[in-house]
Each structure stands twice: as structure tokens, then as C-alpha cells.
Amino acid sequence: MVLFGQEAFCPRMDRPVKPPLPADRLLDCGAGTGRFAAEMAELCQVWVLDDHEEALKILRTRFPAQRIVALCGRPGSACRMASSIL
């Protein structure tokens, strides 16, 4: 299942989409203030990703450092890190 905003997209639309399970992992790309991610963290494991310093400042107050992926440094570094999370 892939989530876009708060709507679920399932490649096979003939199957019902179920809520995530506690063992599921979610990477919120472009997490902003982390509002959606905070809601989802009640249901599953959540990591947040953003490239704006203002958003990262807010995310650092809401999530543990090990759950924040910042887009900075070498090109592609966050992509490699994100793929190891999921």
C-alpha cells in the first residue's frame, strides 16, 4: 500500500485497503511539520524526510533523531538511507 497525503492508493483497486499494522514501516517524504506522520505513528513505525531546514527544526521537536531523514549532503545519500529503512 502506498499513501499519498491521507489517502491510500492500492495498485489493485479490487482489493480493500487496510490500515497499517504496528510492524509496517512508513516513510513520510516531504513531512513538513510532521502532522500526518504523528497520526500514523500511532498505527505503525514512521520515519520522516524533508529538505527544508524550517521543517526539519519542527520535525526534530516531534520525532527521535533516528526517525528523521534529512535531504542534505551528497546527492542520493538520503535515498540510500531511505531504502535501508524500508
Image (cartoon, rainbow, N blue to C red):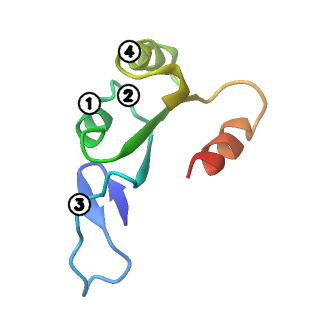
Crowding near the residue tagged with mark 3, few <14, some 14–19, many ≥20 C-alpha atoms within 10 Å? few
Three-letter amino acid code at the position of disc 1: Arg
Q: Which residue is mark 2?
A: 32
Instruction: Judge whether 35 appears above or below 17 on screen.
Output: above
Three-letter amino acid code at the position of disc 3: Pro
- Residue at 23%, 60% (x, y): give it: 19
- Residue at 58%, 46% (x, y): give it: 85
Three-letter amino acid code at the position of disc 4: Ile
State how far apart marks 4 and 3 are (Cα). Answer: 26 Å
Element assignment for label 4:
helix
Q: Which residue is mark 3?
A: 19
Three-letter amino acid code at the position of disc 2: Gly
Compare marks 4 and 2 and give the one earlier in the sequence.
2
Camera-nearest label, 1 or 2: 1
Compare marks 3 and 2 and give the one earlier in the sequence.
3
Compare marks 1 and 4 and give the one earlier in the sequence.
1
Crowding near the residue tagged with mark 4, few <14, some 14–19, many ≥20 C-alpha atoms within 10 Å? few
Q: Which residue is mark 1?
A: 35
Q: Identify the mark at residue 58; answer none if there is no mark.
A: 4
Q: Identify the mark at residue 69; answer none if there is no mark.
A: none
Element assignment for label 2:
loop
Q: Position of residue 82 (x, y in %)?
A: 61, 44
Crowding near the residue tagged with mark 1, few <14, some 14–19, many ≥20 C-alpha atoms within 10 Å? few
Is residue 46 visible in the rendered image? The answer is yes
Camera-nearest label, 3 or 2: 3
Is residue 68 visible in the rendered image? The answer is no
State how far apart marks 1 and 4 are (Cα). Answer: 10 Å
The one of 6 and 64 positioned closer to us in this rendering: 64
